[in-house]
Amino acid sequence: MASFDIVSKVDPQTLENAVNTAQKELQTRYDLRDTKGGIELNKKENTILLSSENSMRLKALEDILLGRVVKQGIDGTSLDFSADEQASGALVKKTIKVRAGVDKEFGRKIIKAIKDAKVKVEAQMQDDQVRVSAKKIDDLQAAIAVLRKTDIGLPLQFVNMKS
């Protein structure tokens, strides 16, 4: 029986390069040069901390970070910008979570998209990935085509194709 896994991963080295180039751009931009705060990557928690003097400059930091992440080849949807801003002393801070793995909510969306397409495959959730199996490789390729057309809200990679 043929199968493959659906995962959502971000290469940590590429993410670190994107954050480093965003920090360099922050230092060279005229409108943000003498501001307090910055962009910090927390590798253990898989988060990025943005801090600035006000909300307008924080939004500029978000734009810089998103631009650099996309230029490095990381899908922009892998960053979760939904966290609220917190005021901490003289700085406004925002924590951006880097999505890693397929959680249950997105796993259900993936499985539902495959079932709605009526492709002859079987999909099941396994930890932080979705395993798709079928009798024919053509059915697996049809499932991949369906998922590429569907907007799940998460960057997907298709790995471990076994025939």
Image (cartoon, rainbow, N blue to C red):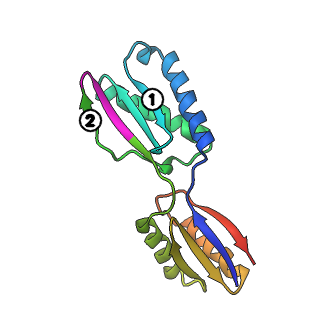
Give yes or no for residue 91 being in the magenta stretch: yes
Q: What residue would you read off at disc 2? A: 86
Q: Secondary structure at mark 2?
A: strand
Give yes or no for residue 155 being in the magenta stretch: no
Q: What is the magenta range?
A: 89-95
* Residue at 52 percent of width and 78 percent of height: 124
Rendered location of residue 43, percent (x, y): 51, 40
Q: For the C terminus, which image quadrant?
A: bottom right
Disc on the earlier residue, 2 or 1: 1
* Residue at 61 percent of width and 86 percent of height: 120
Q: Is 51 placed above or below 75 here?
A: above
Q: Secondary structure at mark 1?
A: strand
Q: Is 23 placed above or below 95 here?
A: above
Q: Are the residues flagged by discs 2 and 1 in contact, CB closer than 8 Å? A: no
Q: Is 101 placed above or below 118 here?
A: above
What is the crowding at mark 1: few (fewer than 14 residues within 10 Å), some, or many (at least 20)?
many
Residue furthest to the front in view is 44
Q: What residue would you read off at disc 1? A: 39
Quarter of the figure with residue 139 = bottom right
The amino acid pointed to by label 2 is Gln
Residue furthest to the right in view is 163
Rendered location of residue 122, percent (x, y): 57, 83
